Image (cartoon, grey):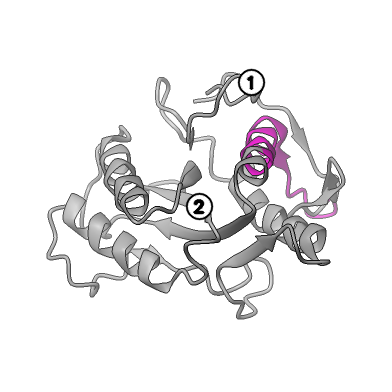
Amino acid sequence: MLSERNTTTDSTYQGYPILTDEEKGYAIDTNIMQKIVNQFKYAECEKSKVFFYRFDLRYPEEMQADPDNDHFKHFMSAYIKNLSRKGLDPQYVAVREQKSSENQHYHVGILADGQRTRNCHDHLIKAERLWEHELGLEADGTHGLVDFCEKEKKTGKKIENGMMMDHCKENYETVKAECIRRASYLAKVNQKELTPKGQHEYFASKMPKGYTNND
């Protein structure tokens, strides 16, 4: 769990649009937001094309989850290995959240090599199967535990998950800004206050020196 919480309700962060609402008091954690931005900066330095997509994980209602993050860590290890075997050079950012009297859930963002993939459907199906397997369920995609993030969180409007940031395209900065806006959902303050002491609420790929990504 992060020891300090610095927040903002500004509509932008370092010039990028973010999912906040000052009137409604919807804030983001700037420590988490900075770590997300750092992952994007590293990705664009390492990859000529960056493919970004999102998904969410939850537990079955009838299951009482352990308070730790072991299931999630095991899942992410298997999932990143799967993407790596496909040559996608994946990076990830993720957060733990929890509503009162419910199990924790997780929001995940993936930054992959856009030279090797341009559609996230198969990757989302694989995430669904691996999460089911980690929870000891039949891995058949029928449990509805992975949200493919195909609706805008604030408006409910249907959107296409998966965006390509291509250095060679004129719209690169526009697409990057939209990717960071979507990723900013992970930095929202709401539902993070129930993370138990001693448990992480933010997870990410390791980066080399020169990029800050401390827990």
Task: Please name whichever residue, 186 or 21, is drawn nearer the observer in this view of the structure.
Answer: 186
* Label annotation for residue 66: none
> Quadrant of the rendered structure where residue 72 is?
top left
Residue found at the very far bottom of the displayed protein: 158
Foreground tag (1 vs 2): 2
Q: Which residue: 64% across, 20% down?
A: 4
> Quadrant of the rendered structure where residue 179 is?
bottom right
User: Does 11 sit above or below residue 66?
Assistant: below
Q: Residues within 10 Å of mark 2 (few under 14, many from 20)?
A: many
User: Does 117 sit above or below residue 103?
Assistant: below
User: Does 184 sit above or below residue 55?
Assistant: above
Task: Please name whichever residue, 212 or 156, is drawn nearer the observer in this view of the structure.
Answer: 212
Task: Please name whichever residue, 120 or 104, is drawn nearer the observer in this view of the structure.
Answer: 120
Find disc 2 in the rendering and name its residue. Answer: 110
Q: Which residues are magenta?
A: 22-41
Main SS, magenta region, reads helix
Q: Residues within 10 Å of mark 1 (few under 14, many from 20)?
A: few
Helix, strand or loop for disc 1: loop
